Amino acid sequence: MTVDVSTDFLRLAAMVSASFLGCAPALVGQWLWPTPNKAFAEARPYEDFVQPTVSGLTVSALFGCSRSDGRQFHEGLDLKPIERDGRGEAADPIFSVLPGIVVHASPKAGASSYGRYLVIEHRGQRPALVSLYAHLLSIDPSARVGAGVGGGQVVAVMGRSAGGYSIPRDRAHLHFEVGVYLSQRFQQWYDGRGFGSPNEHGWFNGMNIVGLDFLDFAERLRAKQVRDVGEYIARQPVALTVFVRSAFEPDFVRRYPELVDGGAAAVDRAAGWEIDFTWYGFPKEWRRVSSYEASRRPADKYAIVFHDAALLERYPCQSMVRTRGGRPALGPRAQDALDILFTGG
């Protein structure tokens, strides 16, 4: 798809400002829905607000092992448009779901499979989170890196931009994620992998972002089953626990102290770490391991302490654990996450 971004943005800006500004549907507290579609806020069926793939299956728009008969992981939520322009192109404004700071804006469609995308960091949450908005037609000029944005502020226009493949007009959508990023040393890890193409997205390359199931979180928040995202993360079941033999302190620990037992500060330096992961690879809880405890652990850099085989078998698309010689071993998803987290250590 070839789109004149500046022309299209100007063409839509007046309509967006007049019709939608400040109209992001409310969830609970500060949380807002990222599009003007009120279907979720009105508790209507998923079909009223999600955009399936060519399969037509509603589940294909959702987070999880939702594609290719459960073999393919989808880390976001795909939301369909409710407004189209005279050419049939999606015209929905995209809202920031929380107050935050723009930390990445990628205006070049072909630079990522996300197409044009935007990342906003929400430091007022505990833990701090990033929200990601992808396949955009255009990014609002006000959403420049370093700029503060309000909750409900228009930051983009929905589209169908993508890199390396084409999204048909009738399946234009917003790919939306909420999560954390793993490491500020991501570039060092990326360079060491020899991917053959440059990383144009710094820390906010999709490989460095681990998302949560936003729809599940929003449903539980609405039902008052959780009070905030910190409680939601705490209640996620542990699928894998890994011991890491390293005194190195990843920047993740300082950035997300709420996920570390005892917080970021520690009296004694750790000789290792024990990390709990969800089935989808979110490092939900960290515990320091003392020198004495580490001396009683396996000599390997990474060692599986626990894995929930039944839970992991339900979600094979992430390959968190594989069986080798009849014994559990780290799968590629867990291996990459740990290597990124401990790059430089």
Image (spheres, rainbow, N blue to C red):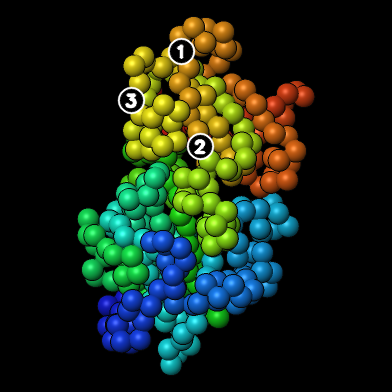
Q: Residue at x 44, y 77 (%)?
A: 36
Q: Measure the C-alpha gap from mark 3 to mark 2.
A: 18 Å
Q: Which mark is residue 283?
A: 2
CB under 8 Å between callouts 1 and 2?
A: no
Q: Which mark is residue 221?
A: none
Label 1 is placed on what type of residue? Ser
Q: 227 or 283, which is in the foreground?
A: 227
How far from the left and from the top, in percent, is residue 14? 28, 86
Q: Measure the C-alpha gap from mark 1 to mark 2.
A: 20 Å
Q: Residue at x 33, y 82 (%)?
A: 16
N-terminal-most mark, 1 or 2: 2
Q: Measure the C-alpha gap from mark 1 to mark 3.
A: 15 Å
Name the quadrant of the N terminus: bottom left
How far from the left and from the top, in percent, is residue 70? 71, 54
Instruction: Give the left or right position of residue 255, taking residue 147 as reference.
Output: right
Residue that label 3 marks: 265
Residue that label 1 marks: 290
Residue 316 sits above or below residue 151 on the image: above
Instruction: Give the left or right position of residue 192, taking residue 73 as reference.
Output: left
Label 2 is placed on what type of residue? Pro
SS class, disc 2:
strand
Residue 265 sits above or below residue 135 on the image: above
Q: 168 or 265, which is in the foreground?
A: 265
N-terminal-most mark, 1 or 3: 3
Label 3 is placed on what type of residue? Ala
The image quarter in which residue 309 lies: top right
Name the quadrant of the C terminus: top left
Nearer the observer: mark 1 or 3; the answer is 3
Residue 25 sits above or below residue 323 on the image: below
- Mark 1 neighbour density, 10 Å: few (under 14) some (14–19) many (20 or more): some
Q: Residue at x 55, y 57 (%)?
A: 224
- Mark 3 neighbour density, 10 Å: few (under 14) some (14–19) many (20 or more): few
